[in-house]
Image (cartoon, rainbow, N blue to C red):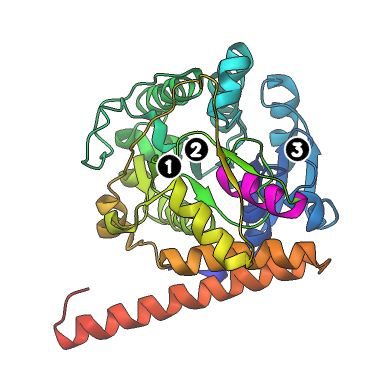
Amino acid sequence: MISPNFWQGKTVLLTGHTGFKGAWLALWLEMLGAKVVGYALKPPTEPSLYEASNLAASCVSVIGDVRDAEHLMRIVQEHQPEIVFHLAAQPLVRLSYALPHETFASNVMGTVNVLEAIRTVGTVRSAVMITTDKVYENAEWIWSYRENDRLGGYDPYSASKAAAEMAISAYTTSFFHPDNYSQHRIALASARAGNVIGGGDWAKDRIVPDIVRAILSREALTIRFPQSVRPWQHVLEPLGGYLVLAEALYKQGATLSGAWNFAPAYSEKVSVGEIVQIMSELWGEALPIELAQTDQPHETTYLQLDAVKAARMLNWKAVLTMPETFAMTADWYKRYAAGEDMRRVSTEQISAYMKALESRSLAASGDAMSGGAV
């Protein structure tokens, strides 16, 4: 469970707060009473959740580049965070083919710069470094990948994130080793989540934003790999896992350091083609579809994560069904198109999600008391 009392008054450094996932996490942390210090480039898209929710007015928002080690260090020293979430990255597979150097510089050296700031400042007690499900050397098999499976990367994005994982591991063993926790007092973990969907994502070459743009413009949707399967989940699912993990690291220390998967149940797999159909039906409009005709850069066809570790050690599980996930997502975009206050809409969805978490927790407690399965 997420403990609002724990977060009240905590100073949290959140890199990447102008991005899709980062903006949702910033809103959630503010609702929990944390002081959010955001550090990121300007919003990567227009429109953006960051601007639609007016985050600049409610948090300390620093526009900066994680590749700028000196500037990042200065901000960290100034605000003295207790908890760090590192989400800043070049997050797109297809863009990494066009910008491989920028991708490696942002995702590897940007991560190292954040790690150096954590090591130097002396106030951080808990840090969650966000990578991706694509850090695994993908054999295109039907089994789900576990945290101790081999890392790899076919494309520059995946390889850069796997390299970031190696940097995180090196800092853990070299500077934040669990055996020396009483001396450094820093608990560090990486978090790997699958493809997330939800309102407020406007990135290019992502299936849900592409669907919404096609519907609003009344143009045909071009899709590349309709049979591709990913561990789709609503953006609030892994973000809730990150919050639970950060709190556990803070309270329990470096015994929880290491890698963590956050993914939906295996049965919740959905293909790209099925997502198009579901979103079209929820919007109430038929969507013409075209298959991309030109050769496309390689993308993984099948990918699933095993989140048993998070379930057993953090009591974290995804709580939304696929229909609920898509309904929430379509609702956000429809209300955006209608001109509603998207900060209010977004916080309403966070509140509803937290109630769903609480209901699951109460149901699990009831099963445990009656001797049933949890």
How far across and down, in percent of the image, does residue 346 sit? 68, 65
Residue appearing at x 85%, y 55% in the figure: 57
Query: To which residue does mark 3 refer?
Result: 78
Residue 210 lies in magenta, yes or no? yes
Provide the secondary structure element on which disc 3 rests.
Answer: helix
How far across and down, in percent of the image, does residue 85 sit? 56, 43
Query: Of discs 2 and 3, which sits in the foreground?
Result: 2
For marks 3 and 1, the one nearer the N-term is 3
Residue appearing at x 21%, y 80% in the figure: 368
Q: Is residue 356 above or below residue 90?
A: below
How far across and down, in percent of the image, does residue 116 sit? 57, 24
Q: Is residue 256 visible?
A: yes
Amino acid type assigned to the residue bearing label 2 in the image:
Met
Q: Using a 10 Å C-alpha cutoff, classify the residue at mark 1 as few (fewer than 14 neighbours), some (14 to 19) or many (20 or more).
A: many
324 on left or right of 140: right
For marks 1 and 2, the one nearer the N-term is 2
> Which secondary structure dominates the residues rendered in magenta?
helix
Instruction: Give the Cα distance between marks 3 and 1.
Output: 26 Å
Q: Is residue 148 above or below residue 288?
A: above
Amino acid type assigned to the residue bearing label 1 in the image:
Ala
Query: To which residue does mark 2 refer?
Result: 129
- The quarter of the picture where the C terminus appears is bottom left
Query: To which residue does mark 1 refer?
Result: 191
Query: Of discs 3 and 1, which sits in the foreground?
Result: 1
Instruction: Give the Cα distance between marks 1 and 2.
Output: 6 Å
Q: Which residues are magenta?
A: 207-217
Q: Using a 10 Å C-alpha cutoff, classify the residue at mark 3 as few (fewer than 14 neighbours), some (14 to 19) or many (20 or more).
A: few
Q: Using a 10 Å C-alpha cutoff, classify the residue at mark 2 as few (fewer than 14 neighbours), some (14 to 19) or many (20 or more).
A: many
Residue 95 lies in magenta, yes or no? no
Evaluate if marks 1 and 2 touch, with contact meaning CB atoms under 8 Å apart: yes
Provide the secondary structure element on which disc 2 rests.
Answer: strand
